[in-house]
Structure formats: structure tokens, C-alpha cells
Amino acid sequence: QVQLVESGGGLVQPGGSLRLSCVASGFTFPYYHMSWYRQAPGKERELVANIRTAGGITNYADSVKGRFTISRDNAKNTVYLQMNSLKPEDTAVYYCSANHYLRSSDAYWGQGTQVTVSS
């Protein structure tokens, strides 16, 4: 049974930090590119960051460059998103996603974790 379980969301003040985690099970984690997406109320889901299988190549949305860092631990089947200098516009449900490095149709999603940035 495939599972992606996100955690680490919550309420934080502007300028604060959070670290999201996504633990994967039921598939061969090292063979999958991993991504974080987010969806704010009334908006479409958008890519926040992704990381290739071996972890050497990362990509970020312009809105989070310099503030967010994606990383992965293939030994723990876990991908992380370190979020610093948070802004109210970062408020959204954050989703973890996995895509097989060869078969793009082989993809999985987590249930999401809420991040709220507010004073």
C-alpha cells in the first residue's frame, strides 16, 4: 500500500520557520523524484520545490527561492521542506508528491498538511 504522510505544518508568525516532512512507504523511494506543492484557498495547486532521485538537483518556485530548502534522505524514505522567513502569502495546504524517474505516469500524492502564517 502506497502512502505519503506529511507532517510539520501549523500556525507560525510572519518571519518564522517550519520544517515539513513527508514519509513514503509502499514504493521504491530512491527511484522517485519528490516534490512539494501547495494550494491556497481559491487558487490552483502550484509547485513549490522538487528534488531529483539522488538529491543533487533541486528546483524552486521563484516565490520561495532563498527562503525554502528541499532535501531528502533516501535511507529514511523521507523528503523535507525547510521553510524560513515565512510570509502570509505562504499560507496553504502543502502536499508531497512522488514521480517515478522514468515513468511520469507513476505518481503518488499525500493528503497534505496545513501551513498558516499569521500574526
Image (cartoon, rainbow, N blue to C red):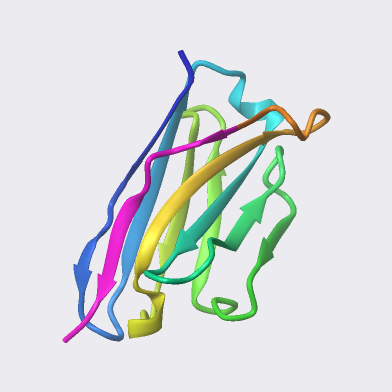
In the image, what residue occupies the spot 53% across and 65% down? 44
> x and y percent of residue 6 in the render?
36, 42
**Front-lying residue, 7 or 75:** 7
- The magenta stretch is 108-119
**Front-lying residue, 118 or 85:** 118
Q: Residue at the far front: name it.
A: 42
* Image-quadrant location for residue 108: top right
> x and y percent of residue 1 in the render?
45, 13
Query: Can residue 87 be seen here?
Result: no
In the image, what residue occupies the spot 53% across and 57% down? 37
In the image, what residue occupies the spot 67% across and 36% down? 99
Query: Can residue 61 be seen here?
Result: yes
Q: Residue at the far top: name it.
A: 1
Tell me if residue 85 is in the magenta stretch: no
> x and y percent of residue 4 in the render?
44, 32
Tell me if residue 110 is in the magenta stretch: yes
Q: Is residue 78 depicted above or below 30 in this figure?
A: below
Image quarter of the C terminus: bottom left
